[in-house]
Amino acid sequence: MNRNPTSLPDVLAPLARIVPVYAPGAEREDGYDLWLRYRRLGDGAAAALAKAASRIVIPRTPSIAMLAAAAELHLALASMCGEAVTVTHDVADGAIVLAVDPSLAREGYRISAATEGKRVTRIAGGSDIGTLYGAFAWLRAVLMGGDPAAIEAASAPKVGLRFLNHWDNLDRTIERGYAGQSIWDWWKLPDVKDRRYLDYARAAASIGINAVSVNNVSSRPEILLPDWIAKVRALADIFRPYGIRIFLAARFSAPKELGFLGTADPLDPAVRAWWKAKAGEIYAAIPDFGGFVVKANSEGQPGPHDYGRDHADGANMLAEALGSRGLVMWRAFVYSQHDPEDRHKQAYTDFKRLDGKFAPNVIVQVKNGAIDFQPREPFHPMFGAMPATPLAFEVQITKEYLGFATHLAYLGTMYEEALQADTFAQGPGSIVAKVADGSLHGHQLSAMAGVANVGVDRNWCGSHFDQANWYAFGRLAWDPHASARDIAREWVLQTFTHDPAAVDAIVGMMMDSREAVVRYMMPLGLHHLFDTGHHHGPGPWVDNLARPEWNPAYYHRADRNGIGFDRSPSGSNAVAQYAAPLAHAWSDPATTPDNFLLWFHHLPWTYRTASGKTLWEAMVAAYDQGVAEAHGLAERWKKLEGAIDPRRYAETSQLLTVQEREAKWWRDASIAYFRELNGLEMPRGAAAPPLTVEQYRSIVFHYAPGRGG
Amino acid sequence: MNRNPTSLPDVLAPLARIVPVYAPGAEREDGYDLWLRYRRLGDGAAAALAKAASRIVIPRTPSIAMLAAAAELHLALASMCGEAVTVTHDVADGAIVLAVDPSLAREGYRISAATEGKRVTRIAGGSDIGTLYGAFAWLRAVLMGGDPAAIEAASAPKVGLRFLNHWDNLDRTIERGYAGQSIWDWWKLPDVKDRRYLDYARAAASIGINAVSVNNVSSRPEILLPDWIAKVRALADIFRPYGIRIFLAARFSAPKELGFLGTADPLDPAVRAWWKAKAGEIYAAIPDFGGFVVKANSEGQPGPHDYGRDHADGANMLAEALGSRGLVMWRAFVYSQHDPEDRHKQAYTDFKRLDGKFAPNVIVQVKNGAIDFQPREPFHPMFGAMPATPLAFEVQITKEYLGFATHLAYLGTMYEEALQADTFAQGPGSIVAKVADGSLHGHQLSAMAGVANVGVDRNWCGSHFDQANWYAFGRLAWDPHASARDIAREWVLQTFTHDPAAVDAIVGMMMDSREAVVRYMMPLGLHHLFDTGHHHGPGPWVDNLARPEWNPAYYHRADRNGIGFDRSPSGSNAVAQYAAPLAHAWSDPATTPDNFLLWFHHLPWTYRTASGKTLWEAMVAAYDQGVAEAHGLAERWKKLEGAIDPRRYAETSQLLTVQEREAKWWRDASIAYFRELNGLEMPRGAAAPPLTVEQYRSIVFHYAPGRGG
């Protein structure tokens, strides 16, 4: 909020209490700039920056990506200093010199003080894209408050494919999107090049994203028709200077559904030829096309099983069609419509036996947990269990199961928890991060995929804080060993403020937020207790859906006597899919962490937890703590009034009010339901829910977002 | 583009050819500010403005609307001058004094130089809303380049209800919306008060809009449930300071569909009581609730006919429920699913006999023409024919039938054409504008309704030029006798530039644009030849839809011998619904204007038009002229490069490219089809279509926007 020329006159305060009016200029703090928030600096800082970056020097024959790096620096410096700098080929004191240094990793960079006759800052990349990443890293350091004359850094990504997955439908609805419709305006493409495409590419590249799939994995085949390929090409052309390759979600039945063939059998020569020709057609339009991401034989999507083939048959057919230039990202999120086996176990069972059978340009993309992006899950047992297959680590950035875009839940901690989990596959220290970066089993290919939370909402993500989850995904995909707290701090410094107390306060809120959500929604390892369809709000009572594993009652298994899903050897024995130390520990409730207690065990309500409380007392206490923490988030934010620009302050306050109310609702509805089953009194000091279970059940949400088209 | 600190360095030009990058700051010209474009002035102009508006003076006990007027002036002056002015109660030289003068019309205003001891500009309204309108009028004059020290004006609206109708569904899709999803983020309402709601209210109030219906007339009943009324209330609270009353589209079957009653019969006492209670519930939340807009017994919507009642029974029941505080806007866009009569005639036939039977708080809302918002229609025969009933004049601002948001078509000329049409109802000079303003038959109530073209697209309307249609609607609703050209000029001066040559050029493009669309789509009175469902592109061959009047073939009736719909006495005799002079003239092709020739007559291809050309020659010539004009729009725009900021220049260029291509497609597909019927050679000098009819028929548009949820 530097140089805000005015404030809202006090006399207008009665209006401001009713309508979202702010001081002139303050309404521009709408979040659109994300963490690339190049605000005019104070005069002293602007002068220092202008001196340390007196010009931008590019090679004599710059690539387009090199020009993109220069354009970013030019934009940032003009915005922060208030006057433009030259972009030139001639070095002078204080120049920012952009260069390529082939001795560096291809996507890596080095920022160093150099004296090429003059005192300059040299930003060198292993390729022009590395240079672009270096330029963004230099700007990040500046935005975080670093001395622009003294920035030195070197880095290279640890993961090869840093992959955003858009679940965007072709009609611009978004499955599990809570930030408005898709930013891809397919109707106006390819002619109209919305500035959003560029700003998206800039933001994604700034955190190292280098691959994007633009359409929903629950896909429609039309995206593969020529007029749609032309639309995709227009996006690819804009993304290319930013080092971003486009992937498409391929519908396995496309050759049949589009009417070209009578079958989509992956072993049928005509099918193989069709996909090969299709890949060639796409490559002709998009030479750096990344490949296909495929959701097959899952939740109604077609796949190789429809023809008695297995996942490797399907994946390898597409891999052959793409050739070595492209990748197949074959998703492991599959469970049978007919198999009565614990859903937790099915993907592992399906894929484990295929390890080693996938073509070299296939990556199997595995969700962080075995169920479905729950607020907390143990890591997926496939991690560490597929030594011969490169696995992508997939997380949701959009918050399907964590309060949509309404609740504050920083997911950096959730990603970190999964990445730091030890699989014990190669002994202690075999953490999931080493699967993600390929080092555990020495794979050349490595990938992290995040389901995007981006939409046309002005702030891109549905709320200001949800931007941090996009940011954290990118930073962890660059380095899956990084710290969620460090990333939160980076983000706050760039996005909100440099005020040390405010930074600490906001980082603290972020670090506590996801655990609060877990507590007020589903403590102690409970999972998937959401209301039907939209996944908004509690539905522990739901038991009427066609498939058993679609029902919350399937997951909590609560009755008069106890609660929890027995996945120990006495139950489904899903624990056996984990390495021995974990299988052993998680087989016994006494050695299972409280976090996963009811994930792995069915226990009596009177079970005595480590805290000394009974299970029922511990559960109610956890719900109460979650609600108290949600209340605390709102209170902590209130203390930041004045430290944050008024628009983002107000918009966040409104959401935190919703979060607190819905936290209470989650607690009360859940407890009311469980009490109806167990007949227990409320623990001493805990208030009984104000409504009956029937009343909670009767709460209906019409037209909830995120269900797609 | 004042004070743009930089331009894009030439060296970055190769990047700019690929991605939509502009000079730093220029990317902010995204159209969001609409015509309220308060850009920093040059130093001299800023000083003059600051002197002429040295402070804002408000009454000692200002209403909220008065504060809204002060806030708008404060925002504008701070933005244009670079420093804020005081808002105070104390007069000084150069003050802008906001006041209420009850001698003025309630919504009228007077801007005058005054000496209240000091030299001030006095902006007085007949009420605080009048003052707000005066403040916007003063700003409009400033933005148009007027001397801020010498602005004097007085005006009052000629139409009582200036009504925007949103066809926005509750899932945020928009029926016939081409600017992205609905700006109403129902999911986050009522808690989250998006700044867009305020900016929408400011823009609407600035052109005099005083009523808004927020949901689609093809309505869902849930909007009437308590949690939705709370959401609507949050919008009403933000709109109230801006003089905007909220209406709801009521689903006639709501009491039944929501499960409260077994019937929706308007004469059933329980139904009457239900609606009365519902109105009371809404009034309790929204004391200034405007009332209901109803689409009944039309296109599958429920209505009083379902119970053997007539439109007056239905409308009057709701009018009684609302009481005198509220209005029923009962739409006349009805045609029977079963009546084989010319659709053109049905609404008149249905409603004419009900004239005088409607309650005093019912307005019958009539589309500009009798069919459905075609690029050109003769005025609706109900205008002038319902002396005992106030009629609202309804137009579409969104361009369902004029190229969506892609084609440039300034609709001010279309509205003007209909408003200036003489009904002859009370003798010559009985123009439609006098029906709209109530003067023709001396009605107290008067209304103009426009189907909004607003969505979440950053520029609100899907394109920069489509903003002009929103603007023109508002200005014509304020004064339906105003000139479309004057309004275009106002808009260009506020929105684009003050450069006289550029202003003339842009106004010229706008004035020519709609006629070009008519020519390349459907010249000579042809109508409704759109492809099925999405109304994008030509579909003259379509004849397979269930209802005859859904088919283009129903409207053009072309065959080997001739073309056109005979609505003369030898045909459906729709002409008889017009006053005698028109009925007489339009019964004979020789005295029917070329514009309506095939609207009213079926003529042989060899018919000799006034120009001396045969009908076939004249038709091909019109198509060719339309294409040439579309090409001309693109060429004329190219000459404005540099006179327009680069972002809006580029975005408009891209759309004009599409328009030219699609103009050719319209011409070629139409001519190919008609030639297939008539077997005629192309007229000398005219090129034959490059594709076959079958090829044009095979063009399919997947996921076209605007079909709603």
Image (cartoon, coloured by chain):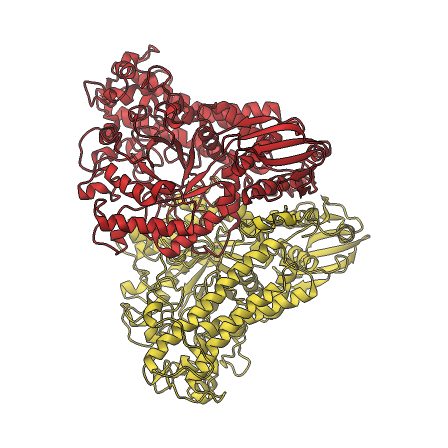
Chain colours: A red, B yellow
Going by the picture, which residue comes out furthest to the right?
B117
Percent position of residue B240, x then y: 55, 50
Say if residue B631 shows up in the picture.
yes
Judge whether B187 appears above or below B256 on screen. Answer: above
Say which of A405 and A640 sits in front: A405
Q: Position of residue B455 (x, y in %)?
A: 48, 53
Q: In the drawing, does residue B102 fall left or right of residue A102?
A: right
| In the image: residue B456, left or right of residue A84 | left
Image position, residue B709 (x, y; %): 36, 53
Q: Residue at x 28, y 28 (%)?
A: A673
- Residue A403 appears in view: no
Front position in the image: A101 or A318? A101
Residue B249 figure quarter: bottom left
* Above or below, B400 relative to B39: below
Q: Work out whether B498 lies above or below A291.
A: below
Q: In which quarter of the image is residue B470?
A: bottom right
Residue A642 spot, x, y in % from top left: 62, 31
Q: Quadrant of residue A27?
A: top right
Query: Toward the viewer: B660 or B206?
Result: B660
| Residue B701 in the figure: left or right of residue A119 | left
How many marks the image carries: the answer is 0
Q: Is residue A118 left or right of residue B242?
A: right
